[in-house]
Image: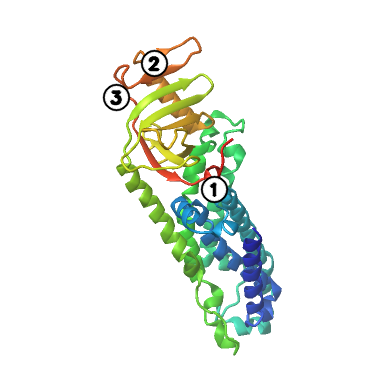
Amino acid sequence: MRLWLSVCVGLFTWKFIEYKHWAVFELMGYCVTTAKGAAETLKFNMALILLPVCRNTITWLRSNTKLGWVVPYDDNINFHKVIALGIAIGVGIHALAHLTCDFPRILHATHQEYEPLQRFFDEEQPDNYWWFLRGTDGWTGIVMVVLMDVAYTLAQPWFRRNQLNLPQILKRLTGFNAFWYSHHLFVIVYVLFIVHGYYLYSYKKWYKKTDIPCVCYPQTWMYLAVPVLLYPCERLIRVFRSKYNTVRILKVAVHTGNVLALHMSKPQGFEYTSGQYIFVKSSAVSQFEWHPFSITSAPSDDYISVHIRTLGDWTTQLKSVFAWVLSRQAPSSNQSGLLRADIGQGDITRLPRLLIDGPYGASSQDYKNIM
């Protein structure tokens, strides 16, 4: 955390000082230095936020490097959230500095103050905010903020866990499904982010106004290049590996305590250690969603088991699907209300098909002794 904060402060300070030597500083002053400092932290954080969810990379780093004192392997999702907060703060500072300080100074500048800036904006001095918003960097910024607001809002715990008492017509705006799908709006955000960084007012050869060296070309793509390529590769690995790691359901138990127990065949070559987890997908519930669950079977077992507690919409639907199928196939049961089916106790070929991806490392696998 301290390293991340230090990098953010360093980037902000570097860009803040650099813009003090640009001609734009003569009119906009510390408004533009603040906006550009925040923008530099945004480039860094928009790149960094993808890395905590690159689980294959994290698992490899955990197993093959000693970077645990720097990289928060065991708290990657919380670190992802912290970076998201940093992005929200950066967006707020960047937007407010422009809207409440930079743009008003240009709009209310005298002819003499504006004249040196004509070659970079327009010969005719802007007289309203629409001039700034109609440009590519203007509308891309607005669209990004709107999409980010939607994704951030639906990612909040009370939305994601369906804790709000909303009218039925608005229920689709809550739950994990809404969170998961809205997060994919960031595909659009990243495209707009690169476009926004390319069409900047201040990148119209400001360096000709000063003899002091500066970095005067769009840098956004440089920050994003590796993470934006790495994350899709991670998703492709999941697709290919899930097709290779085919599983067959061996045993199902639907407990009354909102727990679904699944025993699956172990794919050839599938190796894991105690404490690791896998992702599970069921096309009977969703064609796209993957959810993580701890592996509850021992590494020496000839099967893989997971115990799924029904907390959200996806897990509730998965349990309902299995309960409905088992109830129609005369499963074994007892007085506690347990529904259960073994592969040898009848035909369960109609059970939903599952795909798995993993295994992935977790903090619970870092142990030396078991008491």
Tell me, yes or no, whether the two marked residues, 3 and 2, touch with CB atoms within 8 Å: no
- The image quadrant of residue 95 is bottom right
| Disc 1 crowd, CA 10 A, few/some/many (<14, 14-19, 20+) | many
Q: Measured along the vertical axis of the image, is residue 143 above or below residue 265?
A: below
From this view, report whether residue 351 is shown above or below residue 45: above
Q: Residues within 10 Å of mark 2 (few under 14, many from 20)?
A: some
Q: Residue at x 31, y 38 (%)?
A: 246
331 shown above or below 233:
above
Q: Reading the chain from its start, which is encountered first: label 1 or label 2?
A: 1
Residue situated in front as seen by the camera: 333 or 362: 362
Name the mark on residue 120: none
**Quarter the N terminus occupies:** bottom right
Q: Amino acid at mark 2?
A: Ser
How is the rendered protein coloured?
rainbow
Q: Position of residue 175 (x, y in %)?
A: 53, 36
Could you say which disc has been placed on residue 151 in the image? 1
- Residue 298 in percent (x, y) is at 44, 34
Q: Give the image location of residue 93, x and y in percent.
A: 66, 62
